Image (tube, rainbow, N blue to C red):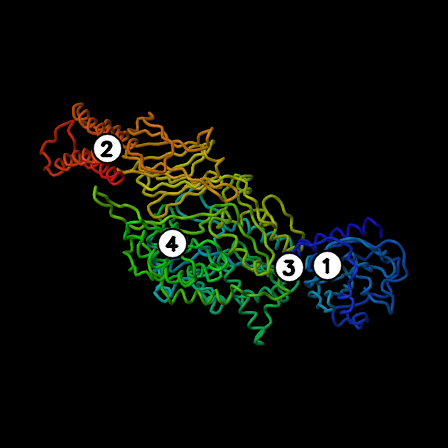
Amino acid sequence: MSKTKHLRLLFVLSIFFVVFSFTPKTFAIGVMTDFSNFQTNIPSGFFTNNNSFGYTCPTGIPASDLPNWEPWWNIDGITVRNDSFSGTTTFLCPSGNPFITATDFPYYFTHIDGYINHFGNSQYPVDWAIPHTFAYNLQKNDGTGTVFYISFDYLGGLIPPPPVGCVTDCFSNVLFLPGLEASRLYEQRLDGTEDQLWEPNSNNDVEALYLNPDGTSKNADIYARDIIKETNTPFPTGPAGQNIYKSFSDMMDDLVSSEKINEWKSYAYDWRKDVADIVNNGTKYQNDTVSLVGTLQSLTGSASKNGKVTIIAHSNGGLLSKALLKKLQDDKVAGRNNLIDSVDVLILVAVPEIGTASAVPAILHGYNQQILGGWLMDNTHARELGRNMLGAFGLLPSRAYIDRVNVSPVAFIDFAIPSNATTKLVQAFGSAVDSYDEYKSFLFGGEGRTDPAINQTNLPINLSQNLFSNAENLHNNIDNWVPPTDLRVIEVAGWGLDTIASFEYYPVCESSTSLNCTFTLDERPRFTSNGDKTVIAPSAHYMSFLGNAEKYWVDFKNYNTITRLNREHKDILEVDRLNNLVKSIINGEEIVLDTILKNTEPIDDSNRLRLSIHSPVTLDAYDVDGNHTGKICPLDNEFCYTEENILNSSYLEFGEGKYINLLEDQMSKVKLQGTDVGTFTYESEKVFPDGTSNISSFVDIPVTTQTQAEITLNSGTGLPQLALDVTGDGITDFTLTPNADFDPITYLQIMKATIDSLDLNKGQIKAFDKRIDGIIKAIQKGKIDKAELKAEKFKKFLEKKLAKSDPKKPKPKKLSKTDAQLLLDMLNKLLDNIN
């Protein structure tokens, strides 16, 4: 064998040891001089002609016949060397000599006894702290005749051969476990036809999925059948028929049709249930109950080319897989079965292993669970569905999450003067939940709150302590699960999309007079880019944090920018680079890393904008190409839907607030449109790559249904500037710069412009303008008391107008009660801020 071939083999081995080691480590490349651990643990009896462990020494093959034989090395199931014999020798493995000797490895790989040259001091990395399996195979290159086989690990343990008949592509079958809400649910109608309940066609379908307080289904006849490869929502919500598992399923089908694997199965399940219940009791299908354990077992043994199964799990399916494997591990210890030995690889994709912070507002408020703007499922129905859903409770942050993640999932703000909206929360928990006990107490309403009305989604419900205890037991069982040493675990996390890390309760003024403000509870999210829009990476990488898995990242920011798509958590298995990783693992090939699939945490080099508005105003963002992110409400339809066409952007409605997240270089402009009378506060937070940020605000800007505004970034300062069109005539009336504090002068000038737009006679407008000018002058002179007095006089005038009964025939160009109320509300807001 030539020197070039020797070097090529070493190169392949070096790649293997770097990429496929079970434990993430930094390897030093150097001369390996001590292999005594390997050498001394191989028993001398290993080198006899004993085929009881699959070892057969092929004696007596003449040199003239060697070109008809094909040898290959296989390391940890990965073929790392294919070669053909050349040269001359008398016999391969002559009688009395070993197939491979301890002194040969890793200096020699003795294809032909005495033929391969000494590798000498060739350099390559190897981690001897973990086991590796080495197999040598030899068969005639036409695929016929005896397969000579030997397999061992570096500690000297012998490995049984693969199933008889498998020579090449001896790859595992695959079991796929989908995420929450990614299996379709059905029931039979009275007329015998089938009704698909999930995905829902209306809120009535959601109601049919409601559960009892103990977590059991109110309708015992609901069954599962198939995973959602492509959504079949009845109305277009952007791309019709969104792919969820289609590309992944197509890839798996190709692996079967190309005979790389024998079979793959997906296991659809009723995701409303606790994963432990699914493991122990299976899932109801139309005609029978399908066991998860039985489904796994059906893929093992002779059904698989190598007798093994690889489990691939997405999102909640990862919790299901860990619960399954923990049970099988316990079964082996108890002597019930050894089924866990048939699982060789576990691939966890975007799994909230220790929970996700976004599950807290989702269950307490129905946050961000709308489908088609509430037409198919609104927040109210989503919260009622989640209230008793054990599957959803399993996604709540666990004790490990509270201990591991350095951001509290819940925070609270109150004012110096108690608001009575968040006051009890602050008194009970301080400014943030900072312990697991406090977190549980908050979920259960420990500050003394009562359950709100069903439609009061701005107020949190109290969670069931019994259902939470069930989820708590689940995480106590699986969070710190240690897989068998021969089970390879790979974790993949999404990165680069703004993901909820925490949410904050704060008081908001619901109605006001000049004397006080009536506050109500509101909430707003806090984000991190270290996630996939649903799950943060520290949760998806928890097993590697414990030292039990390899970890990878899918860089969504790069992927979406390159492909012009907007992939995220729910459709991460549509990402081709991720599917390539899965296929490489199944096929025993090298994992190819690039700018999208990475084995180190991506570096964020972009400024991010997090925009929010709290008011009766729409919020819409556009990039330079006119792509839109915001809410679409077609005039000819009764539903609205969210559009997120700007790359790596998101639109959310959370409580009374509206939020848009996007990269700074993707923003061209933001448009606002008034939908009612009041004021709006617009906030733009710029987050820098190092995590620091600054906030620019436009505070308490008066708004009516005519008001329009456009916000752009100043090319010189990079700060936002707001062009305000008070009357909606397309002409900018004011150009504003950010101001974190209430600006009474600007406020009154906008109020004056609002008065000028009313349908009043010139005399009335002039009189009202004079009143406003008087208040402005008093403030400019620092005479706040005098300004308040003038505002109060104007208020009394308006209140008298409102107290009068409506004339039978309203006179044209006179102040209407609607306009009077508008001006009165504006004056109250002014007085609230200057008092």
Determine which of the numbered discs, if any, sits on residue 783 in the image. Answer: 2
* Residue 22, numbered circle: 3
Report how far apart the C-alphas of labels 2 and 1 lie in the structure. 88 Å
Per the model, the C-alpha gap separating discs 3 and 1 is 17 Å
In the image, is residue 419 above or below residue 468? above
Report which residue position mark 4 lands on.
Answer: 431
Residue 234 position, x and y percent, is 39, 47
Q: Earlier in the sequence, mark 4 or mark 1?
A: 1
Residue that badge 1 annotates: 74
Tag 2 and tag 4, C-beta contact below 8 Å:
no
Q: CA distance from mark 4 to mark 1?
A: 57 Å
Q: Residues within 10 Å of mark 2 (few under 14, many from 20)?
A: few
Mark 2 or mark 3: which is in front? 2
Check disc 3 and report its element: helix, strand or loop. Answer: loop
Mark closest to the chain's N terminus, 2 or 1: 1
Position of residue 558 relative to residue 63, above or below, is above
Q: Is residue 196 visible?
A: no
Label 3 sits on what residue type? Phe
Q: Verify CB contact (< 8 Å) between mark 3 and mark 1.
A: no
Q: Amino acid at mark 4?
A: Ser
Q: Position of residue 811 (x, y in %)?
A: 12, 28
